[in-house]
Image (tube, rainbow, N blue to C red):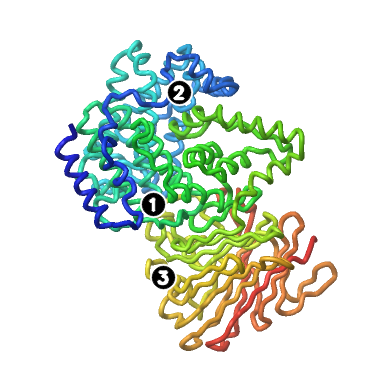
Amino acid sequence: MKTTLLSILLSVAALIRAAAGNDGLNLLQAEYSKPGVAESFAAGKAWFPFPAYEDRAGWAALFGPDAGKVIRRGEQLLDYQWQHIPASAYLAFERTGDRQAMERPEGANRGAMIALILAELAEGKGRFIDQLANGVWLAAQQPSWVLSAHQGRQRSKRSLPDAREQLIDLASGRYGSIVSIAYHFFHREFDKLDPSISVATENAVRRNILDPYLDPGQRRANWWLGLASRGSMLNNWTPWCNSDVILCFLLMEKDQERLDRAVAQSVQSMDLFLNYIQKDGACEEGPAYWGAAAGKVYDYLQILYDASDGAFSLFGNERIRKMGEFVSRSYIGNGYVVNFADAGARLNNPSELIWNYGHAVGSREMTDFALYCLADPASGKFRNPVITGNDAYRALETVRFNPLIREAADSLNRLAAETAPAEVRRNLRRGVPPATWYPETEMCFMRNPSGWFLGAKGGYNNESHNHNDVGSCVVYVRDIPVLVDAGVGTYTKQTFNHDRYKIWSMQCDWHNLPMINGAAQPAGAQYRSKNTSCDLSKGMFSLDLADAYPPESGCRKWVRTYRLAPKGAPSVTITDSFALDARTQPDVEHFLVKGSVVLPGGTHQGRTLPDGELLILCDEGLVVKMTFPASLKASVDVMELTDRRFSGVWGPSLRRINLASPPDAPAKGSYEFRITELGKK
């Protein structure tokens, strides 16, 4: 029998579904309320889809040839010194904005524990149990697993954990899942050392995760649940935290009533997230956050699928599949991805996660993309996924599905030995549409037969991980960056406080956007695009940017149109048609490039560039020509990249092309910018 409280929650869910109608909202609650589904989650049930620790044959079959590497990694940690985190490391965030003083040692401890768990599961001889007990014992003694940067949600507003209050963040949920997994497999071994280890572990998970999750008084601090303030912004925290927390409950909670409450609450919270984001499948935070957003939705759904013996399943839902395929569609090539907002421009999503997601939802596009990412471009040989990472559940999922991935990789290697390896790899991307339009998120990706890629966006300036970038774009030629988005630097206190938009990479004028009448786009949900349209057959994306700029711009209309030539000579044309109330300041069109720039009047290969023409000298000898109205004055600013998160992607610097109109330019008119390939240096 389900409890009265659960019955109330399900009744509320039914009312919400009835109000929502058939618009695709509340998918999880609809699934959860089906007959017998809620009852399939039973406290103490043996559901975790892995062999018992003692089942050596089962683990040998899963690890296969990876066992040796996993064990050697664990051996390197047999003398690991578990790191104590002093008060000063937490306080560094308040004092200097430094997050890493606290995050670095905690991350090292988490990573060590995962590697030791895997090593002991792979070997099974007890060699790593003492070190695992040390790690679990240390974790149990910590007053909180929350990062210093997130402790400010305590009532004390301080970065040092306050033992009088517990909240949950990304790191604490992840730490809780690691500790719960260690307990699940090894608590009998810990008991042989001393039962106090298991008791301390249970108490720590309850104190740090289970109790604060169920505490209504903590909903303000645990904002990511979406239950404290309906309609508020949600982001990847919601699926990330919920997936880790529900794993803790399903592994550790022995009280059926509490487990019922937790599952029902997680289903409601996850629906709030899916209701908040757009239904077109795009990740507005960018593909670098796909693993933390859609990828964590998959983790959550897989956990509930397994824990319910398949009774709870949304893997056949088209929207869930589209969310997964975004990671494939947003891939440009040569490791680059479309990177609007805080997302980085390099693919950082593990291939095994992509494969597991694709396998679950039946997407050949995703499983092929995962295999494509496992190919060594130099040799053409397909590698096996590496079983590492800082997420214990995903590491185990890699172990679980690695036999299938190894079989697919081996098959491709045999095929590559008989044919051209490069062709085998190319074939894995043939199923990806050349163009994709996400009409609700207002994001499009287009590639023409010549290998030119255009990504462009609309939206608004209060998206998750927002940059003031409505209307911006990226352009790549045969996977070589031409017009780029810088992304974000190393996270500091400023990254997420009131000074965020003082950071150069967040600002409109460091994106491929204009300063209109001297004004840049501000932050705020009211600053958005309008009249957005996309015609994939013509390679055209258009939107009006007038409302993305403040009133002082005097902008009545600013229609930006991107055109990627679908055939013939490859080119990208950017047209701005505008109408201002009055001209008070120049317009300045900005373009951010990775290469060096030759301005009008400069020379290239003995030729002097005329007014209205500049060259961008890109990687691999690519030379791109940009033509523009001769009335615009061209200049270049250099941004030296001292932050390793920037320089690791772009090198030592980026350059911003500035094309400024005369101060007395007409208040109505248009600018056209055309990008074509000149050839090699």
Work out which residue is located at the far right of the displayed protein and give it.
606
Work out which residue is located at the far left of the displayed protein and give it.
4
Instruction: Give, as a three-letter code, the residue at label 3.
Output: Tyr
Which mark is first along the chain, 1 or 3? 1
Q: Nearer the viewer, residue 55 or 518?
A: 55
Whether residues under marks 3 and 1 lie with C-beta atoms below 8 angstroms apart, the answer is: no
Q: How many marks?
A: 3
* Residue 647 in sight here: no
- Give residue 145's position: percent from left, percent from top: 34, 36
Left or right? Give the position of 107 relative to 257.
right
x 44%, y 45%: residue: 292
- Give residue 554's position: percent from left, percent from top: 45, 83
Whether residues under marks 3 and 2 lie with C-beta atoms below 8 angstroms apart, the answer is: no
Instruction: Give, as a three-letter code, the residue at label 1.
Output: Asn
Left or right? Give the position of 65 relative to 596.
left
Left or right? Give the position of 380 relative to 639.
right
Left or right? Give the position of 574 relative to 322.
right
- Which disc is residue 527 wearing? 3
- Which disc is residue 179 wearing? none
Which mark is first along the chain, 2 or 3? 2
318 versus 350 height, above or below: below
Residue matched to label 1: 235
x 49%, y 75%: residue: 544
- Mark 2, residues whose alpha carbon is within 10 Å: few (<14), some, or many (≥20)? many
255 versus 237 height, above or below: above
In the structure shown, which secondary structural element does the residue marked by tag 1 occupy? Answer: loop
Whether residues under marks 1 and 2 lie with C-beta atoms below 8 angstroms apart, the answer is: no
In the structure shown, which secondary structural element does the residue marked by tag 3 occupy? Answer: strand
x 33%, y 37%: residue: 245
